[in-house]
């Protein structure tokens, strides 16, 4: 059974523009913005605008078009930042035990560990 989606999570508020953030990259169904509390030189969050709670929910329930848009946006972003050459890490904390604080699916893009 799918986990219930909390409409009041902070990323839902960012999507509804109730909380300001500077979008650094976007796709048709995807947005990217800087993490407010960076854990690496580059720390960007990539989220689908659809209501998915975690990576499993997104992978199993998002449409092919949403999934393609999501990964294409990450591809575009990493290329724009030159990370396709220098390397990067993608992290999807999943569930409370996995350290997921915000219950809207997001990927952490982290880079710059070699500097
Ligand atoms: P997680 O623990 O995987 O759920 O990660 C949630 C991330 O969201 C944390 O790294 C937070 O620093 C980040 N975060 C929380 N609120 C905001 C916000 N308003 N803008 C940008 N990042 C945020």
Image (tube, rainbow, N blue to C red):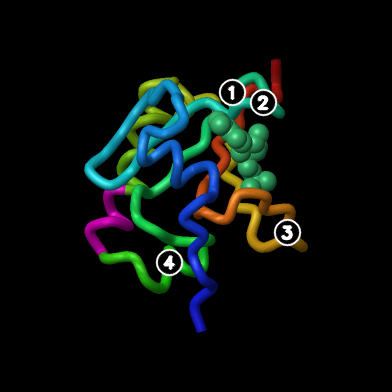
Q: Earlier in the sequence, mark 2 or mark 3?
A: 2
Left or right: residue 66 compared with residue 71: left
Left or right: residue 33 compared with residue 48: right
Task: Name the spot of residue 67 as percent of width and height, x first.
Answer: 32, 57
Of residues 63 and 5, the one nearer the viewer is 5
Q: Earlier in the sequence, mark 1 or mark 3?
A: 1
Q: Quadrant of ligand 1?
A: top right
Main SS of the magenta part reads helix
* Circle 1/circle 3 CB separation < 8 Å: no
Q: Which residue is mark 3?
A: 98
Highlighted magenta segment, given as a residue range:
64-69
Locate residue 17: give its quadrant: top left
Q: CA distance from mark 2 to mark 4?
A: 26 Å
Please say if 75 is above or below 51: above
Q: Which residue is mark 1?
A: 42
Q: Which residue is mark 4?
A: 59
- Cβ of mark 2 under 8 A from ligand 1: yes
- Cβ of mark 3 under 8 A from ligand 1: yes
Characterize the local packing of mark 2: few (<14), some (14-19) or many (20 or more) Cα atoms within 10 angstroms: few
Characterize the local packing of mark 4: few (<14), some (14-19) or many (20 or more) Cα atoms within 10 angstroms: few
In this rendering, does residue 87 appear at all? no
Task: Name the spot of residue 77 as percent of width and height, x first.
Answer: 38, 30
- Cβ of mark 1 under 8 A from ligand 1: no
Q: Secondary structure at mark 2?
A: loop
Q: CA distance from mark 1 to mark 2?
A: 7 Å
Q: Quadrant of the C terminus?
A: top right
Left or right: residue 115 compared with residue 57: right
Q: Which mark is residue 38?
A: 2
* Circle 1/circle 2 CB separation < 8 Å: yes
Task: Name the spot of residue 79 as percent of width and height, x first.
Answer: 38, 27
Q: CA distance from mark 3 to mark 4?
A: 17 Å
Q: Earlier in the sequence, mark 4 or mark 1?
A: 1
């Amino acid at each position: 059974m799918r986990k219930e989606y909390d409409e009041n999570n902070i990323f839902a508020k960012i999507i509804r523009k109730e909380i300001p953030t500077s979008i650094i990259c976007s796709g048709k169904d995807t947005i990217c913005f800087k993490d407010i509390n960076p854990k690496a030189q580059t720390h960007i969050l990539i989220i689908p605008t659809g209501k998915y709670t975690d990576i499993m929910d997104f992978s199993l329930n998002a449409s092919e078009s949403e999934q393609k848009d999501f990964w294409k946006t990450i591809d575009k972003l990493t290329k724009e930042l030159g990370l396709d050459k220098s390397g990067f890490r993608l992290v999807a904390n999943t569930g409370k035990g996995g350290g997921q604080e915000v219950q809207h699916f997001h990927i952490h893009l982290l880079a710059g560990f070699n500097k």
